[in-house]
């Protein structure tokens, strides 16, 4: 019986060393923070203001997008902070999208931030993003964005979406919202 237990323990040690070796080999090194990682984002801050064509071939629109920088947890007296990633997506394969306004409003309807100083373009199939940091509580539980945009007539309209996420300990929370065109 003793040889059996020693064999099992020996095999378990060998298995654990094998798994540990696989983990070490597959790691690329220490985890990088956002500032250390290669910047692959194509955000609004990388865009320069452009002159918008003034021809009659453009359709203008406004889109409302709800976001949550915090949500209630357990009661109305306790909130949970979230990171919000706002995606502005040009889903056209051939036409440029123009964004005139990207304004952030808090729960009380007060504009708290303007993200654009002038119109910017979004190339076909390009996505630009706005990130509201987890520790930014300015928007509150009823935060929202308002976007003004234009596209060529007959072109599919842009898609606006927000992903809210937070992790604490071993628990994670995430959900999405989608923009609604204002009439």
Image: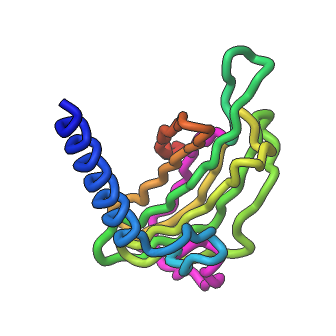
Q: Give how far across and how far down residue 2 sits, in percent.
A: 23, 34
Q: Is residue 11 left or right of residue 134?
A: left
Q: Quadrant of the N terminus?
A: top left
Instruction: State how the image is colored.
Output: rainbow
Q: Residue at x 80, y 34 (%)?
A: 108
Q: Give how far across and how far down residue 161 sits, in percent.
A: 48, 50
Q: Is residue 25 left or right of residue 108?
A: left
Residue sitting nearer the eye, 7 or 176: 7
Dividing the picture into quadrants, the one containing residue 109 is: top right
Q: Give how far across and how far down residue 42 sits, in percent.
A: 52, 75
Vertical comparison of 23 with 13: above or below: below
Q: Residue at x 34, y 66 (%)?
A: 21
Q: Residue at x 79, y 49 (%)?
A: 111
8 in magenta: no
Vertical comparison of 125 with 65: above or below: below
User: Tag count in the figure?
Assistant: 0
Vertical comparison of 143 with 85: above or below: above
Residue sitting nearer the eye, 180 or 171: 171
Q: Which residues are magenta?
A: 42-68
63 in magenta: yes
Q: Give how far across and how far down residue 20 sits, in percent.
A: 37, 60
Dividing the picture into quadrants, the one containing residue 149 is: bottom right
Q: Residue at x 54, y 50 (%)?
A: 63
Extreme residue toward the top, this view? 75
For the question of whether residue 155 can be seen, the reply is: no
Residue sitting nearer the eye, 1 or 62: 1
Q: Is residue 131 left or right of residue 98?
A: right
For the question of whether residue 20 can be seen, the reply is: yes
Vertical comparison of 117 with 15: above or below: below
Dividing the picture into quadrants, the one containing residue 114 is: bottom right
């Amino acid at each position: 019986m003793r040889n059996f237990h020693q064999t099992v323990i020996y095999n378990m040690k060998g298995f654990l060393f094998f798994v540990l070796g696989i983990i070490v080999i597959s790691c690329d090194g220490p985890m990088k923070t956002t500032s250390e990682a290669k910047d692959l984002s194509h955000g609004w801050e990388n865009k320069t203001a452009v002159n918008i064509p003034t021809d009659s071939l453009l359709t203008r629109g406004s889109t409302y997008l709800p976001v949550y920088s915090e949500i209630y947890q357990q009661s109305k007296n306790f909130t949970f902070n979230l990171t919000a990633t706002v995606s502005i997506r040009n889903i056209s394969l051939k036409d440029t999208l123009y964004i005139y306004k990207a304004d952030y409003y808090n729960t009380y309807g007060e504009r708290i931030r303007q993200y654009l100083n002038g119109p910017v373009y979004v190339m076909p199939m390009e996505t630009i993003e706005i990130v509201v940091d987890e520790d930014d509580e300015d928007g509150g539980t009823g935060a929202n964005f308002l976007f003004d945009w234009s596209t060529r007539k007959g072109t599919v309209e842009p898609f606006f979406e927000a992903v809210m996420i937070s992790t604490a300990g071993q628990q994670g929370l995430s959900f999405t919202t989608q923009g609604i065109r204002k009439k």
